[in-house]
Amino acid sequence: MTRRLHLNAFLMENGHHEASWRLPESDPHAGTDVAHWKRMARIAERGKLDSLFLADSPVLWGDIGRRPSGALEPTVLLTALAGATDHIGLIATASTTYNEPYNLARRFASLDHISGGRAGWNIVTTAGLDAAQNFNRTHLPSHRDRYDRAAEFVDVSLRLWDSWADDAVLADKAAGVWGDDDRLYPPAHIGPHFRVAGALNLPRSPQGHPLLVQAGSSENGRGFAARYAEAVFTAQQTLADAQAFYVDLKRRAGAAGRDPDTVKILPGIVPAIAATEREALALEEELDRLIKPEYAKRQLAEQLRVSPDALDLDRELPDGLPDEDEIEGAKSRYTLIVTLARRERLTVRQLIGRLGGGRGHRTFAGTPEQVADAIQHWFDNGAADGFNIMPPVLPRGLADFVDHVVPILQHRGLFRTGYEGTTLRDHYGLTRPANRNAAPVPA
Amino acid sequence: MTRRLHLNAFLMENGHHEASWRLPESDPHAGTDVAHWKRMARIAERGKLDSLFLADSPVLWGDIGRRPSGALEPTVLLTALAGATDHIGLIATASTTYNEPYNLARRFASLDHISGGRAGWNIVTTAGLDAAQNFNRTHLPSHRDRYDRAAEFVDVSLRLWDSWADDAVLADKAAGVWGDDDRLYPPAHIGPHFRVAGALNLPRSPQGHPLLVQAGSSENGRGFAARYAEAVFTAQQTLADAQAFYVDLKRRAGAAGRDPDTVKILPGIVPAIAATEREALALEEELDRLIKPEYAKRQLAEQLRVSPDALDLDRELPDGLPDEDEIEGAKSRYTLIVTLARRERLTVRQLIGRLGGGRGHRTFAGTPEQVADAIQHWFDNGAADGFNIMPPVLPRGLADFVDHVVPILQHRGLFRTGYEGTTLRDHYGLTRPANRNAAPVPA
């Protein structure tokens, strides 16, 4: 069988371009309007995409002047989208630093039950002091500490999701026995970060547990992904960087005792699509012109840990920026931004334009054929198992991708023409995990 | 205008009677089937009920043999029900002891946005060591501590919900200014239990904040309700007890500086409804016969803090039970059970039958006319502003109430014949709270 692409729609309010909300076609209140999100989910499902995905951080980030701010909580919003769709996978970001395993494992299991097996969890440790200050902290826990907690969080969650044998519910009306207490496996977990007795208060869900997704590319992030992730979202600017990341992560997964094919790697791409290349470039330019540099410069300064005054819009980045080792959050994104600016000798203004389109993800303007070529080129050359599609403008950018790029990929035999399975893991060609409690491996 | 009743549907998997799942008509997998819940929500909405309500505790409670166990997380499940309904209010239980204000306030604000202003929060402090042991605790925090934390939790949540002025979103495309940072009011809260910087990452929701509901009738619970609750659910067995509770809570609300009319009191009733009284009693008897006393005795023993061996099915409760003061969780329910057993000199078997129907709530078997009379009698005699309707069997018990009791109440002018407002607070005749930040009261 031909190897098939996997496609995920990464959705933001009015699209990934920070100025997209200023276009005449955009509804600046779309972010809190569930009808908008339902329309997007239905368009993505019309394109037979594997899944859609919502980023998240439990904090109001940056200036609300700059772009639509605030976000409906993703597990709740995706539950609403489950009711508006039948097939597409639903991946929510949630933080291991600012949640408790019992509550979060339960919400994802609930979403998996409600959606008939379409839930995915993008596991994040949440960078930034701002978020920490919403959760009783005065300091951001270190990168290492956050990843240690994340690993224990996921270990406990897996045990909670496996805490009911698949056959624990007997539903024996005649005998008056609903479930078998002997087929419960409470974790009784005691660790450095958590004590969780269990069992979970939900029978095992259709997928056993949600698809586990990860999106951090730092050293700690890669180690974590190799151990747990079934799908990995990553920001890669060049084919060479993407190939190196792909090889490295597959190798790490193998070293962790996993089949590397069971870890699907999806770089992001922000495609500006139009009938001609000139129109596509014009769309990109129109959007970049709508960026207000004073907002963007302030955000870039925060990301680089420098004062806004240290940045001159018409010069390159100053010398003397910190090393990645000194950064305690969003490490890999920091390095990506600095590398991009230095490699292409971009002025701050140019860098802002590039980041405004996709916040460090690869931007690409072209015809549907050119976008399909760009996708196939990376896919055929060991850089990707699929793509994280990040429309710069919604709904147009998603509809154009679904209606014009997807048919080309289907015609080339690279993408499904209909859903073949029912669960998110089916779409990614992954099997339902066995319950490790109920079928113990002999020692 | 005639004073109007408020009716809330309190739903459990197969109904409140613990043996309801054993009836031939019941689907024992209904609890995790979102289609079941959507059907129930649509029936309740067909009856023009004010709201529906889900109880909750983040723990697997008791034996799974006894009855359908496990529960979809309520904020998630109600989001699914928001998409299946247009008018009815949606009240989810969530714990202040085992959540963080930022996350929970955000989920309720999300549900309020998604449902168009139909969210309600039943605020609980969560009794029981079992739940504590799922959240890093080895001991249950004391009743007093849990209520202190709850008060601070709600205070912070209110400040988060008010952290965006109603007019904070400018959506000024021409100027490129989406929101006004000067119309944000971050709580910057530092208290004994929480530090929360804020602001919330969501614009103010349609209701301003979810309807606040409370259901604990202990001394601490009543004080809390008087201060915060807009609706109060309560278990009352007799008219006299219900009147005393009603007078006491209204008085406390007044003493707390609130208009007592803005606190709606809804006792629970478990109505077994049939065309004749004999059939209604037969239904109740059929259900009671299906209770397995060994399960029920074990649970009663836990509630009474005695060994199961101390209880004899064919004798009354033993002497020497603890005082309410010694109980650290579910205080008022404990007292209600002991009082009921002593007052009516019930054997353990009889007590189990009474509790099996409604876990301490008032059970009532009769014709639709008799049920309507029972409701009106309390309503007309200063015991209730409405009722918490707890169908013993689903969907039958809810459909019978909606199709046969509601029309009688409507005919008597006691209940609405159509929804007149759009939000949950509209249904309860309450006004949208002003934003306390944006319109400060002069000192």
Image (cartoon, coloured by chain):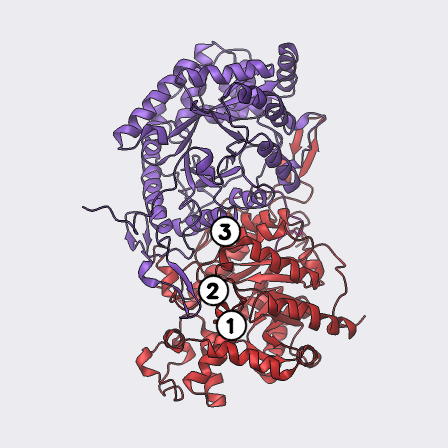
Chain colours: A red, B purple
Image spot of residue B73 (x, y percent): 54, 43
Q: Locate the N terminus of chain A and report the quarter of the image it occupies.
A: bottom right
Seen in the picture, residue A338 relative to A134 is either above or below; the reply is below
Quadrant assignment, res A276: bottom right
Q: Chain of mark 2?
A: A
Q: Is residue B19 visible?
A: no
Q: Chain of mark 1?
A: A
Looking at the rendered image, the disc whose residue lies closer to the viewer, 3 or 1, is: 1
Which residue bears the numbered disc 1?
Answer: A17
Q: Residues within 10 Å of mark 2 (few under 14, many from 20)?
A: many
Q: Earlier in the sequence, mark 3 or mark 2?
A: 3
Please, what secondary structure does the residue beneath circle 1 have? Answer: loop
Residue beneath the point at 40% across and 81% down: A323
Of residues A156 and B49, the one nearer the viewer is B49
Main secondary structure of the magenta stretch = loop
Q: CA separation, marks 3 and 2?
A: 14 Å
User: What amino acid does circle 1 point to?
Assistant: His
Which residue bears the numbered disc 2?
Answer: A147
Give the residues drawn in magenta, as a range: A198-211
Image spot of residue B280 (x, y percent): 63, 15
